[in-house]
Every structure is written in structure tokens, then in C-alpha cells.
Image (cartoon, rainbow, N blue to C red):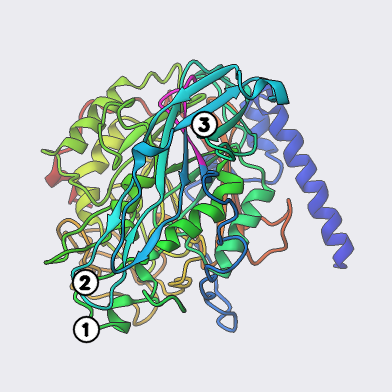
Amino acid sequence: MATSTIAGTLHSRHLHCRTLLLLLPYLPIAFLLVDGGGIPTTLDGPFTPATRAFDRSLRQGSEDVPLSDPRLAPRARPPSPEQIALAASADPTSLWVSWVTGRAQVGSHLTPLDPTAVRSEVWYGERPASADTVAHPHHVARGSAEVYSQLYPYPGLLNYTSGVIHHVRLVGLRPSTRYYYRCGDSSLKGGLSDERSFVTLPAPAPDAYPRRVAVVGDLGLTGNSTSTVDHLARNDPSMILMVGDMTYANQYRTTGGRGVPCFSCSFPDAPIRESYQPRWDGWGRFMEPLASRVTMMVTEGNHEIEPQGHGGAATFASYLARFAVPSEESGSNTKFYYSFNAGGIHFIMLGAYVDYNRTGAQYSWLEKDLHKVDRRVTPWVVASWHTPWYNSYSSHYQEFECMRQEMEGLLYQHGVDIVFSGHVHAYERMNRVFNYTLDPCGPVYITIGDGGNIEKIDIDHADDPGKCPSPGDNHPEFGGVCHLNFTSGPAKGKFCWERQPEWSAFRESSFGHGILEVVNSTYALWTWHRNQDAYGEHSVGDQIYIVREPDKCLLQPRVPRRDALLQH
């Protein structure tokens, strides 16, 4: 078929799909099952497992972008704000604005900046400011500021102290409304940012949803990362879900230079795994054009763990200082896990690197949070954390099996619809599954850890000949080891399947990102965009309508016992 014919066919199909998407709330389900615009639905599943093989003649990844690159280098001169970012609050009547002022310092003898010496202000309104309203804005909100430091008691590792990091919460906002804002310190010449704007998320309701939710994980700052973000920006999201491992600052040489895929391998004599904190500042500048106009919601990954000090005590210093999340508003009181509403979607962000056991605080909070969800108002429940429970790649295979055994039953009991994770640097979408068994009432698990980081793309599957990891491999950086052999089915008695598992619907080794478009209380369109394709609206690697069946899948009466979860 000629190239022009293929393009015309794709364009016609895209227009058909877009038309269907607009009409979807008004079409009878019988029509959708017959037509559907060529896009499958989860009602058609479970699907025969499929793999799009990686072309091993292609590069698996690219090098880190240097801090001298214009996208990473400082653009604002103090006291002007930089690294401006937005985050949703628990509901759309409030929103967080964060930014950095002053210069970070790297070296041996540092003097931290004083966070009380500069104001944290946001001036905002529903109309753009004019020259004579700068001094008398519609609204002024004030917040808090902090400085954090990474101090190493070892020669050769450079200390760091941050600029002043500001967080201000805006309240009393109207949902689905455009606001214009400037942030900074109005008492200083050049202390306010240029004017930006954002649109608040819709109010919780079964007929109101964010236009597009972008999902990306394990992003980093490589050439592939820039391709992902450029591609994502072209898809014009109204919110971003970042599922951990953002900068890979802990994989960057202190002396600058190239990033390394394994710090401990390249620096075997280093007493701890060092973080090169200026990469965080570069990442904040890199994301600012997008993050300053749409909310970006984050959860921590293993590369946010930053050991320091004698004994290598683990900290999340950068993550905890740099990001504002609705932890207090959602009752968790910790940035490691929280929840928020965006229209008819209730989002739950969990922490894989803090206690997830049933006797712990996170589990107790999750149980209470799920009990409070009113599916008549927020029909969709979407959960996210960094480490996948269902994964057929060799990398990280069964790594967080302990977390699955502790928490899967609770999510299943409350009918969680979709789960997004990263960690594995590839794409994989599962058939609906619970406890390794195909289940029409289980969530759709999606691994989207293919943002483009320095560790390169994962291409080996656990079912490939000779690629099944040893049960002694893939130890998590937090929590115990609960590796198990399957007790029934085609993989009975074995640690790995010998073919792509039946719960794995589709997988491909490619960098990219995803877009979730919830249409109504029943249908959501999920599209995975791979970077290898040409940019634009036709670059689709995987697409499916995820369909809720609330009448069929009623809330389960109780959480299955832990020992029952082990029976397959």
C-alpha cells in the first residue's frame, strides 16, 4: 500500500475514532460492541497475549542531556522564580503552586540560604493582569518556604544546598476555570514571575472529567526523555501523572560528565550511592514549560531514595522538599501516599518504599480512603505507585510480590479500575487480573516505565529462553522478598512462565507515554504513544477502551485472607 494511502486510512480512522469519542456518552452499548471505531474494548477480552518484538539493531537508549543545555540551564536571574510547577489539591477548589528562588550551591563549604528572607506569594485572578493591577491583584495567597541540603562526610562527594523552595496553596477556586497568576516576592525588583495561566480541574461529578491525563514514568533527562516530553506536550494534556523515578540524580557522576547506568558498578569504592543534586534543578527547569500550566502529580520511586551520612541512611530529601502534594488534605499527612479527585476520577497515589503491610499506617489510610469513595460521584478509581505487581519482563520480575500480597485484596474489594506503575523500562498492558488469575472484575494494570532514562529500555522477558531470573534475584530496595512458584495452570510448579503469561495482554520495548481520556462513567480511552513513531496524532502503539461494569462487579464483601492470595 502506498504511503499516502496508509496516511489517508489512518487519518480517516482517527477522525472516526474522534467522532465516536464525542458521541460515546449518547450511544447505546449494543452499538459500541458492534462498531467501536476499530478500537477494542476490555469487554472483548481477555486478549491473546501479544508481543511487538524489539528491533535489536536499534539503540536501547541515549545519554544524559548536559546541564549546559538551554532546557536545563538557569533562565531566570535571582530573585526571579524558576522551576515553577503546579499540583492538584484534594479537590478542584484549591491548587498548589511551587517554585525556586536563589541559586543552589555545590562544593565543600556552603552557606544555606535563609528561606525567611524572601516572600512566598502568588497573585492570581480570572483575568490577565494589566500594568496598573500588579500592585492591586484580585487575590494574593501566601505560603511557606524551605531549603534542604545533602551533606556527605566522605572526600570526593560534593555537598549541596538548594535554592529557596516555595509552596503556596490557592483556595476558593472555581472548578474548570482559567486563572492567570504570577508567583514570587512582590517586594523585590524582578521578584515576580511572568504571568502564566492554568485551568482548574473539573468538580467531582459522574459527567465531568479531565480532558486528557498524561501518564509517564522513569523519565530521567536523556535525549529519549526530551523526545517523550516533546511528544507528551504535543498531545496537550490537562494533567500529568508521574509514576516515580524522575531525575535519576542518584545515577549521575559528581564530577558532571556522563550519567552511568549503575553507580555502584562504576564506583565500587564509593561508600554510599551519591546524588548529584543539580540534576534536580535541571529537571525542574526542563519540566517548567509544561508543569507551570498543568498540574503534575508525583509519587516516589527507588531513584528518589538518596542515602547519605554514615551507614548510608536512606532519605527522600529532594522529593519531600521539592513537591507539594495533597497529603494533609487527603488525611495521609505524608507525601509518600495521598489521594485527590479530578472530576469523576478518584486518584490514589501509593508509596512502594514505605511500610505497606496490613498493620501499617499506609494500609490503614488506604482502607479509610477507599471506604470514603462515593462511586455515584467519582465512578472511576485509578491507583498508581512505582513498582508493578504484574510484570512479565526479566527486569524487576516479582520484585514487589510482598506488596501485592499485602494490598491487592483491598484494591480488588473496592473495585479499583486502573493501576499505573513504572520501574520496568518498557510498556505492558495486562488483561483484567486478580491473584494471577484472569478476572473480569480485576483492575487493568499498565506498566508505563518507559519515559526514557539513562538505564535504557528493557528488552528481555522472563519467559524468553534463558531469561527467567533466579528466585534470588530482584531484591527490592525496600521491604521483604516473597517470590513464589505458581501452583496451578500452565506455569504450575515454576517461577516463570515458559510463554507470555495469559494475564499479559500486550507488551513492547519502546520509550513513550500514555494518555487517558475518560469519556463517561463507563468508558475511558487509553492510548499509548511510542516515541519511535513520527510525532503527531497517529503515533499510537496501543489503544483500548477500558470499560467499567459496576453492575457485574459489585464491591467485594471482604478482603481475601493473605493465605488465600497465595493459591493460584
Dot 2, crowdedness within 10 Å: few (<14), some or many (≥20)?
A: many
Mark 1 / mark 3, whichever is N-terminal: 3
Q: Based on the picture, tell me whether residue 92 belongs to the magenta stretch.
A: yes
Residue 540 in the image: above or below residue 341:
below
Amino acid type shown at disc 1: Asp
Magenta highlight range: 85-96
Mark 3 / mark 2, whichever is N-terminal: 3
Between the C-alphas of marks 3 and 2, the distance is 43 Å
Query: Which is more toward the observer, 523 or 195?
Result: 195
Task: State the SS at label 1.
Answer: loop
Q: Which residue is mark 1?
A: 269
Amino acid type shown at disc 2: Ile
Q: Quadrant of the N terminus?
A: bottom right
Dot 3, crowdedness within 10 Å: few (<14), some or many (≥20)?
A: few
* Residue at x 33%, y 47% (from the top left corner): 147
Q: Name the front one of labels 3 and 2.
A: 3
Q: Based on the picture, tell me whether residue 83 belongs to the magenta stretch.
A: no
Q: Which residue is mark 3?
A: 187
